[in-house]
Image (tube, rainbow, N blue to C red):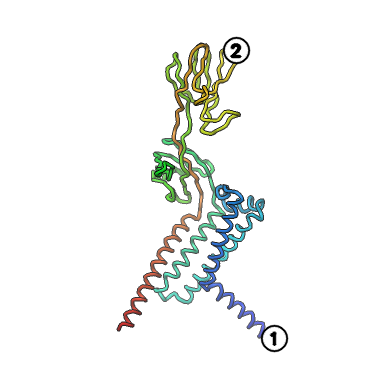
């Protein structure tokens, strides 16, 4: 009987110790510090191993990356597994702290700020976990200015109504400001302004801007017979009894064999043998003679395109509401602290 009583006391003491440790705010603080250290150190190591690590990782839903890519990078991905474990422990600590607050302090409204902070953190972490497990990513969706682009995998259509680029003093691009609308079935979001750190949020979809670029859509040629004319890829004109057909348009820095864009590869038919011309700036690439007739390169016609990442994130609304609750809890706790400090000062002076 005494042995059984000792075992029960030991078990009860162990459970109580675990409970007290779990609900202690210091536990959450320690876990948070370890989480930050692991994230910071792991990110630096990952960057040194591969500077494009974060971009490649962001191209997958976290669940898919963790199960498909991380095992191939091990032990370089060990810090990510540790981060997942620490995140689960932080969520558990927040949940138990919230339960303890409701159990012991539910009648003390002046401590409500503490509960709101816990609940806000809990919702933020939970939202990120939901998005990581059940979310999807569509990277590099390109939309022409004034046009639209369908994304069948997400069942949406993205329209780009306007686009402006903000430049710094050194003329480097600082931000891309897009006017976007999103069509999902019969529901439409926007048009709305989308810029850095201000994505388009519609239900469970988030559209992030990733800059803009100019895309060559046609080559501008001038001939005595046709004057100045724009030819898109596949376009053709007649020059001195021969046909000029634009076979390929190369974008800036795009390569095709030894050809580097911007350039155009043009096939000449109607004469024997069939030949190819390369139109580009410099190195006599701006002029050619077809059956004695001059063909001049006047330039390249371009259009502006926006580049976007679209995330299906079922937990994003939980994250947003959690952030609002966290902010409210901080304000509530600060107000309670200031009120208590003022009351203590008035009591001492009285």
At x 48%, y 49%, the residue is 205
Q: Residue 143's x, y, as percent? A: 47, 38
Residue named by callout 1: 3
Residue 41 vs 160, above or below: the answer is: below
Instruction: Specify few, some or many for label 2: CA neighbours under 10 Å numbering under 14, 14-19, or 20 or more.
Output: few
* Element carrying mark 2: loop
Residue 277 vs 6, above or below: the answer is above
- Image x and y of residue 13, in percent: 61, 80
> Residue 74's image quarter?
bottom right
- Residue at left offset 55%, top offset 21%: 277
Sooner in the amino-acid sequence: mark 2 or mark 1: 1
User: Looking at the image, is 244 positioned above or below residue 101?
Assistant: above
For the residues marked 2 and 1, what is the alpha-carbon distance in whole angstroms?
A: 105 Å
Q: Residue sitting at 54 percent across and 56 percent down?
A: 130
Quadrant that contains the N terminus:
bottom right
Q: Element under label 1? A: helix
Position of the C terminus by quadrant = bottom left
Residue 145 visible within the image:
yes
């Amino acid at each position: 009987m005494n042995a059984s009583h000792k075992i029960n006391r030991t078990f009860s003491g162990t459970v109580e110790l675990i409970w007290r440790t779990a609900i202690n705010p210091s536990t959450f603080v320690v876990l948070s510090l370890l989480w930050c250290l692991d994230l910071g150190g792991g990110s630096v190591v990952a960057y040194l191993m591969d500077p494009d690590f974060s971009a490649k990782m962001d191209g997958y839903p976290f669940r898919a990356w963790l199960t498909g890519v991380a095992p191939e990078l091990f032990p370089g991905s060990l810090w990510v597994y540790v981060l997942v474990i620490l995140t689960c422990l932080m969520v558990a600590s927040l949940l138990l702290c919230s339960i303890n607050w409701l159990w012991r302090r539910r009648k003390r409204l002046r401590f409500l700020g503490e509960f709101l902070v816990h609940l806000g953190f809990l919702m933020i972490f939970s939202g990120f976990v939901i998005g990581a497990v059940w979310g999807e990513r569509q990277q590099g969706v390109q939309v022409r200015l004034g046009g639209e682009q369908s994304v069948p995998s997400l069942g949406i259509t993205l329209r780009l109504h306007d686009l402006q680029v903000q430049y710094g003093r050194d003329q480097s691009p600082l931000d891309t400001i897009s006017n976007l609308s999103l069509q999902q079935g019969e529901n439409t979001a926007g048009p709305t302004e989308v810029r850095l750190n201000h994505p388009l949020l519609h239900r469970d979809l988030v559209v992030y801007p990733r800059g803009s670029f100019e895309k060559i859509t046609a080559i501008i040629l001038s001939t005595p017979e046709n004057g100045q004319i724009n030819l898109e890829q596949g376009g053709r004109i007649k020059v001195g009894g021969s046909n000029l057909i634009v076979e390929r348009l190369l974008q800036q820095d795009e390569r095709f064999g030894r050809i580097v864009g911007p350039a155009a590869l043009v096939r000449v038919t109607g004469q024997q043998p069939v030949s190819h011309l390369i139109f580009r700036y410099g190195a006599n690439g701006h002029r050619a003679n077809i059956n004695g007739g001059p063909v001049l390169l006047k330039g390249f016609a371009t259009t502006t395109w926006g580049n976007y990442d679209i995330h299906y994130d079922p937990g994003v609304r939980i994250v947003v509401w959690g952030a609002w609750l966290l902010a409210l809890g901080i304000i509530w706790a600060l107000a309670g602290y200031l009120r208590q400090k003022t009351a203590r000062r008035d009591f001492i002076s009285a």
